[in-house]
Image (spheres, rainbow, N blue to C red):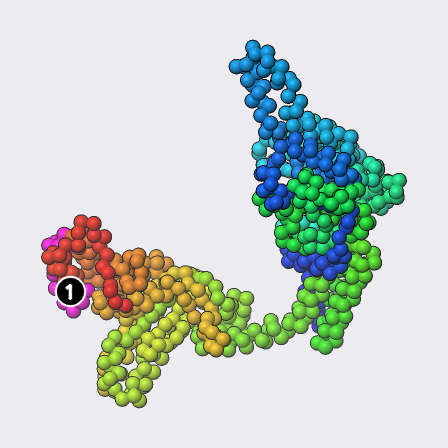
Amino acid sequence: MKKHALLIALGMSLVLLFLGDAAKFYRLGFVQFVDAKLYDYRLILTMPRTADERIVILDIDEKSLKEEGRWPWSRDKLATLMDELFDHYGVAVVGFDVVFAEKDTSSGLHVLQDLGRNQLKGVPQFQSALAQIQPRLEYDMLFADKIRNRNVVLGYFFTNSERGAEKSNAGVLPESVFPAGTFKGRPIAFIQWDSYGANLLELQGSAALAGHFNPVIDFDGVVRRVPMLLEYDGAYYESLSVAVVRAALGMPKLVPGYATAKNKNYGGLEWLTLESAQGDLHIPVDDKVSALVPYRGASGSFRYVSLTDALHGRTPLADMQNKIVLVGTTAAGLMDLRSTPVGEIYPGVEIHANMISGILNQNIKQNPPYVLGANVSLLLVIGVALSLLLPMLSAIRATLLSAGILLLVIVVNGVVWHFGNLVMPLAGSLIMVLMLFALNMTYGYFTETRTKRQLAGLFGQYVPSELVDEMSKNPEQVSMEGESREMTILFSDVRGFTTISEGLEPKDLSLLMNEFLTPLSRVIYSHRGTIDKYMGDCIMAFWGAPLPDTRHAYQAVLSGLEMQRKLSDLQPHFKERGWPEIHIGVGINTGRVSVGNMGSEVRVAYTVMGDAVNLASRLEGITKEYGVGVLVGEHTREEAPEFLYRELDLVRVKGKDKPVAIFEPLGLVGEVEQATLDEVKLFQQALRLYRKQEWDRAELQLYNLMKIAPESKLYKVYAERVAHYRNESPGENWDGVFVFKTK
């Protein structure tokens, strides 16, 4: 035990993490997601996939909209529908999965009444005619009369107002199924709302019952539950499915059921009971008084009848007689499509049909509050046992034990699901067992020995050994996968290398390459740089990966300057061996790039890609145009302010539309000679005159500079430009940018 104390402690910590999630002190997103998906898979595997012939969905479908016009239809048409359904078809119940919150003005009665009060006020014939036809044009009252004394259940919805906004209610709510104070003293977590959209007073007063059609939308947007009771303003309102079943069974009383009826300190509302003469029906509910939807199958598990066919008597009598009819819609434009475990696009009305079927068949899965305690106990027993046993066992025995517990958990969960009709969480226990097993299997090998060997093998060819050692100590900072980082890139290339190579034998050329590439690479290594690749005589390197480096720009500029000094020190040695002088150009740029393993299935390399890389290469290419050894981009200058820079130009390089400012680093601030500082100051003055197109004054300043440094190519380049622009003006709107046509 003492030998494995750290591993056991890690295992126990993992167990505590899952216990906190199971007890709902917090939620682990990945556990919640997996548990939801495992519930969906169990549901799909055990669905009956049969139709419930007692329930018919009267569909406001595309066919109905095409024949009858856009929804909502005039209420006189719905009044006709009621006569058709009850008198012709003899349906048992009609439930509406729609709400009638606004008055129907489609008859034009309000226009006629306005005329009667104004322009035609004194016309007796008009007033008499209006009084005669008014009852036939009051469509809302007409519809209300047709649903009165019939088994009609209206639907409505609750909502929450925007924060800070006034509550906006429409219509009137039905009488609550449980008045305020019914559950006083019981800590039951009812879902609460602060506003609603309900039906017109005359309609609500005529209906037998009404129920809300709010589903519970889970974290992933899927509807798995429907609240059987919702709380509004202290009172409690039943769902549409419960109201329809009550209407179908002759209005039975709804009674709450508690696990321990005498103990009010235990919330324990585990079911609702419909006390019917045909026998009591129990509706199991969870801690939020919601019931799991017992989906029978994919969309279309109930008989669908086009509403327009029913309205015009085109539906066979047997399809509707004595049926529970739900009026809803599958038309996409009416926006009552939901995401469910059995389909991403599922009609909302069919969710209520499934709930009604489940209540009548008594096959709704139970998820009572005590499941939480059972799940915590199960996780505690399994977690503690594995945390103590796995470190003691060999790899094979640990594998067998973990696999056995996984199988046992799955079997027990399946038995409880099938025979006990009970939903127990599954993801937490499965993931915890797998993570405890993975922790024990990888603890010694992967996190210690293997990581160090991998880092040494992967990065030894790119970075110095001391950096590999540092990465081994902090492997969590290192990744081979592609990622975006702020980095600095360096390119160096030998000037005139083609001419040099043509004048040497292959063996001498190879020796020369080694003689200058090796010391230059060591300079890069000494400043924590990573060699990306050698491209003939060119070196590509970067800073800021694989280990983060906040001073990547500083290290790169320091390397570029030191590379020039190192190469200068090598010139006497090259001369002794009869080799030509070697001069290099160095381009450095800083920016956000992609870094990581890139390539193909055949070959990959740890490298960088991006616009900043391309610009670094372009800067190296134009060093020879100005006769300087090192060029850096503007972002590099900003990130490495420790150096003194001379601004050289504002250019547009090939492949880029946006001009960039380029600078020559001259050395660390405080280490540059005064003569150089004076020369830089004079050149900046010349550059300002040049950009202002004051050619004569700029030319004079450049001639003075050429006297100070006759060997400088930079001043000659600008003198030639001045001479050119004096004859061919760049125009008044010239921005001072010089465009390079080649790489």
Residue at left offset 77%, top offset 33%: 150
Residue at left offset 36%, top offset 79%: 518
Q: Quadrant of the N terminus?
A: bottom right
The foreground one among 553 and 123 is 123
- Counting from the top left corner in percent of width and height, residue 318 is at 77, 46
Magenta stretch mostly in which secondary structure? helix
- Counting from the top left corner in percent of width and height, residue 438 is at 66, 69
Residue at left offset 66%, top offset 68%: 439
Which element carries disc 1, helix, strand or loop?
helix
Report the magenta residues as a range: 694-716
**Residue 388 visible in rendering:** no
Q: The residue under label 1 is which amino acid type?
A: Lys
Which residue position holds label 1? 716
Instruction: Please indicate whether residue 485 sits to the left or right of residue 353 in the image.
Output: left
Inspect the magenta stretch and tell me whether residue 249 lies in it. Answer: no
The foreground one among 709 and 497 is 497
Count of marks, rendered view: 1
Characterize the local packing of mark 1: few (<14), some (14-19) or many (20 or more) Cα atoms within 10 angstroms.
some
Q: Is residue 451 above or below residue 723?
A: below
The foreground one among 680 and 151 is 151
- Counting from the top left corner in percent of width and height, residue 31 is at 67, 58
Q: Quadrant of residue 418?
A: bottom right
- Counting from the top left corner in percent of width and height, residue 134 is at 64, 21
**Residue 490 visible in rendering:** yes
